[in-house]
Image (cartoon, grey):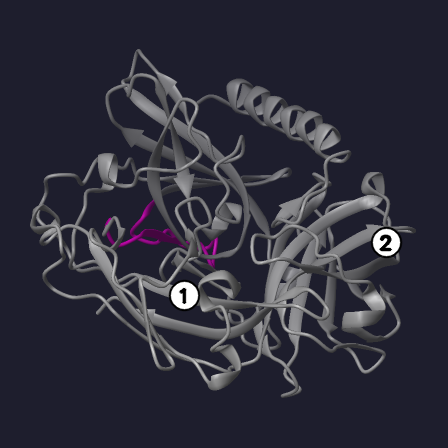
């Protein structure tokens, strides 16, 4: 790709992001969304432990850490608030005074200017809940970050997190033989039982909902699962065809923690006064090929620079080019899937097809680190990605599964998160 075309593509992509962001600013929802195109590399995890999920246990004192980079020239005092949600991520009917002990909003005051980075940015950090803003109830939450006031047009980002109170015991596993024998050696069937105390013996069919996620994905999660049988304090989820996920394949990866050398997955690194461009080796389909065991981190990203750099303020950004050798898939789009785009199947992760080269192309603006990704296909009019078309479908794949158990409280009426389990398929 020559420099003129590259500059055009980058300018076009930034204009597209700004256009879409302006539309979304009036449609803020309870999702992992970034509404300001200047905001990059939003991370939310257990404080001090980057590769963890954003979940804490009510009353244990652990906290979460939110960080992000602002590519603006000026520093701002951003504010934030916490919003309680239902099990399906709608805003709950609770008033903030019912689930927050202390202030309802606060400032993000911890920020630093980047050092020797091109382009320059401002790095923000927040650890919460604080002693001035504590959470009293379990459930689904979002943290909403905004400038000045929380009206939709001022929101720069929202991120989901979980507050659990472990009042149930969850037994989950992936058997070798699924109920549907045609899925043998392909799909992952989740065997699930939940052991509940007497507190939840009343109306379990109506009050208890279960959600299961594969890795960090939202597009293929199973939600609203109800027990098929109830015996004493045990709920069994024994569906005739099982609870089934595509096995998929291990994640592809690339390592760009340093721009001083090319890791095996990188074909070329270009640098100039405007920054870096990282060109990955061309990928190909893995469907119908023998399963290959690869070490991965199940689709997440690890933001990390060289040992002699302070990652938060010295980590640099690059435009990363993805190329996939694959004939055109009719009536569908191909997306790059992973935490590198917050698991969203949107304009940033959608690939362009070139009929002359018979290849798909994509670009992302990413900070130094180690990244996992795969390719999924989304048929026109659908929202769920199909990983099997390009990556294949293998029972041997190591996937993480997260089980969330919600209980609908009556007074006040809200969804408590009374059980959580994260387990590996093998």
Residue located farthest toward the front when viewing the structure as drawn: 202
**Residue 284 appears anywhere in the view:** no
| Quadrant in which the N terminus appears | top left
The image shows residue 3 at horizontal and vertical percentages of 52, 23
Left or right relative to 24: residue 288:
left
**Count of marks overlaid on the render:** 2
- Report crowding for label 1: few under 14, some 14 to 19, many 20 or more residues within 10 A (C-alpha): some
Where is residue 10, by image quadrant? top right
Left or right for 174, reference 67: left
Q: Which residues are magenta?
A: 248-266
Mark-to-mark CA distance, 1 and 2: 37 Å
Q: Position of residue 220 (x, y in %)?
A: 39, 46
Between 200 and 308, the one lying in front of the other is: 200
Q: Say left or right for 259 vs 286.
A: right
Q: Nearer the viewer, residue 85 or 147?
A: 85
**N-term-proximal mark, 1 vs 2:** 2
Please state the horizontal and vertical placement of residue 341, each as a whole percent of the image: 51, 45
Q: Nearest the camera: 332 or 94?
A: 94
Above or below for 79 versus 132: above
Q: Secondary structure at mark 2?
A: loop
What percent of the width, then of the height, locates residue 184? 9, 53
Can you see residue 78?
yes
Q: Which mark is residue 402?
A: 1
Question: For residue 388, what is the image quadrant?
Answer: top left
What residue would you read off at disc 2? Answer: 75
Say if 334 sits above or below 123 in the image.
above
Q: Which mark is residue 5?
A: none
Q: Are marks 1 and 2 in contact (CB under 8 Å)?
A: no
**Residue 256 drawn in magenta:** yes
Q: Residue at x 70, y 25 (%)?
A: 19
Few, some or many residues within 10 Å of mark 2 (<14, 14–19, 20+): some
């Amino acid at each position: 790709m020559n420099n003129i075309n590259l500059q055009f593509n980058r300018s076009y992509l930034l204009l597209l992001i700004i256009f879409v962001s302006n539309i979304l600013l009036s449609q803020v929802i309870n999702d992992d969304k970034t509404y300001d195109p200047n905001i990059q590399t939003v991370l939310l995890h257990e404080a001090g432990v980057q590769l963890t999920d954003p979940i804490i246990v009510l009353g244990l004192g652990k906290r979460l850490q939110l960080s992000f980079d602002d590519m603006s020239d000026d520093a701002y005092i951003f504010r934030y608030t916490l919003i309680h949600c239902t099990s399906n991520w709608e805003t709950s009917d609770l008033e903030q005074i019912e689930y927050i002990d202390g202030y309802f909003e606060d400032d993000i005051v911890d920020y630093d200017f980047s050092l020797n980075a091109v382009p320059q940015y401002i790095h923000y950090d927040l650890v919460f809940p604080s002693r001035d803003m504590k959470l009293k109830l379990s459930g689904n939450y979002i943290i909403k970050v905004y400038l000045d006031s929380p009206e939709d047009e001022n929101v720069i980002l929202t991120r989901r997190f979980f507050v659990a109170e472990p009042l149930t015991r969850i037994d989950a596993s992936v058997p070798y033989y699924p109920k549907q024998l045609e899925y043998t050696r392909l799909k992952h069937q989740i065997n699930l039982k939940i052991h509940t105390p007497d507190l939840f013996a009343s109306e379990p069919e109506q009050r208890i909902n279960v959600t299961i996620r594969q890795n960090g994905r939202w597009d293929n999660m199973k939600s609203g699962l109800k027990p098929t049988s109830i015996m004493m304090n045990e709920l069994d989820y024994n569906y005739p065809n099982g609870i089934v996920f595509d096995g998929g394949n291990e994640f592809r990866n690339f390592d760009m923690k340093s721009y001083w050398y090319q890791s095996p997955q990188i074909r070329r690194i270009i640098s100039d006064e405007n920054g870096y461009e990282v060109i990955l080796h061309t990928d190909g389909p893995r469907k119908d090929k023998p399963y290959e065991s690869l070490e991965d981190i199940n689709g997440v990203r690890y933001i990390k620079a060289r040992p002699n750099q302070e990652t938060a303020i010295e980590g640099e950004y690059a435009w990363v080019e993805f190329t996939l050798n694959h004939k055109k898939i009719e009536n569908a789009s191909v997306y790059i899937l992973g935490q590198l785009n917050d698991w969203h199947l949107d304009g940033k992760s959608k690939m362009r097809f070139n009929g002359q080269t018979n290849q798909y192309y994509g670009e992302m603006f990413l900070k130094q680190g180690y990244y996992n990704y795969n390719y999924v296909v989304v048929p026109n009019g659908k929202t769920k990605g199909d990983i099997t078309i390009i990556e294949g479908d293998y029972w041997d794949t190591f996937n993480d599964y997260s089980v969330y158990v919600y209980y609908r409280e009556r007074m006040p009426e809200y969804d408590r998160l009374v059980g959580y389990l994260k387990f590996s398929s093998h």
